[in-house]
Image (tube, helix red, strand yellow):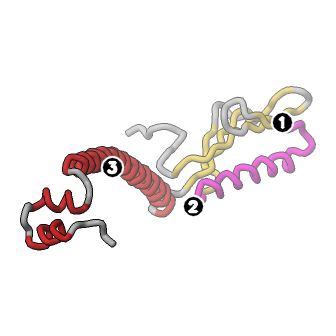
């Protein structure tokens, strides 16, 4: 059966004695029940503090991801806007030698995106090799952009440097008024 005496059950049912009677009827001392409840409350408080710290870290990581996503979107739109809204690229040729008095900087072609301009630059170098096939043609990257040297009989007679710039940049410098 339950292990309770009839009197204990009667007192419990009628409410005589209150919580102390309940504790005795169940068989636990009141102090053990209180200690257990205190321990549970302390464990719950520790868990709540850990959850607060984790929530703070979650917030920090979320904000960091949000900021990085914003930077990436901004950079992508900036690049796309530069290409779409008048953001074309111009292939320039800077020619030195060949009987000219000084450097001759002139646009060769214009393109919608930089990659197309770079491809046109490579084609210009190949065209120079084809046009000057009877001369010695060398290409160097010492200036940071391709420079084609055309030599005849061991002396450099012509140098052409090719560069791609946005259409907002004019390598000839500012115009005088």
- 26 w.r.t. 107: above or below: below
Q: Which mark is residue 138?
A: 1
Q: Residues within 10 Å of mark 2 (few under 14, many from 20)?
A: some
Q: Earlier in the sequence, mark 2 or mark 3?
A: 3
Q: Earlier in the sequence, mark 1 or mark 2?
A: 2
- Evaluate whether residue 116 shows in this view: yes
* Secondary element type, mark 2: loop
At 33% from the left and 72% from the top, the residue drawn is 1
Q: Position of residue 67 (x, y in %)?
A: 38, 50
Relative horizontal placement of residue 147, taking residue 66 as reference (left or right): right
At 63% from the left and 39% from the top, the residue drawn is 104
Image quadrant in which the C terminus is located: top left
Cα distance in 3D space between marks 3 and 1: 68 Å
Relative horizontal placement of residue 104, taking residue 36 as reference (left or right): right
- Evaluate whether residue 45 shows in this view: no
Q: Which mark is residue 112?
A: 2
Disc 2 vs disc 3: which is toward the camera?
A: 3
Q: Earlier in the sequence, mark 3 or mark 1?
A: 3
Q: Position of residue 3 (x, y in %)?
A: 30, 66
Q: Position of residue 134 (x, y in %)?
A: 92, 42
Of residues 154 and 168, the one nearer the viewer is 168
Place residue 46 in its image quadrant: top left
The residue that mark 3 highlights is 51
Disc 1 vs disc 2: which is toward the camera?
A: 2
Q: Which residues are magenta?
A: 111-138
Overall secondary structure of the magenta section: helix
């Amino acid at each position: 059966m339950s292990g309770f005496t009839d009197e204990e059950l009667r007192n419990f049912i009628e409410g005589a004695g209150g919580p102390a009677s309940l504790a005795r009827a169940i068989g636990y001392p009141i102090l053990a029940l209180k200690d257990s409840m205190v321990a549970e409350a302390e464990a719950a408080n520790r868990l709540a503090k850990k959850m607060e710290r984790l929530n703070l870290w979650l917030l920090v990581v979320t904000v960091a991801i949000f900021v990085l996503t914003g930077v990436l979107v901004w950079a992508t739109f900036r690049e796309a806007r530069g290409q779409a809204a008048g953001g074309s690229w111009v292939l320039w040729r800077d020619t030195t030698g060949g009987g000219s008095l000084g450097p001759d900087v002139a646009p060769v072609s214009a393109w919608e995106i930089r990659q197309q301009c770079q491809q046109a630059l490579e084609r210009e170098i190949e065209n120079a090799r084809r046009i000057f096939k009877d001369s010695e043609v060398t290409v160097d990257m010492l200036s940071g952009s391709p420079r084609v040297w055309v030599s005849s009989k061991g002396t450099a007679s012509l140098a052409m440097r090719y560069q791609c710039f946005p259409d907002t940049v004019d390598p000839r410098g500012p115009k005088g008024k």
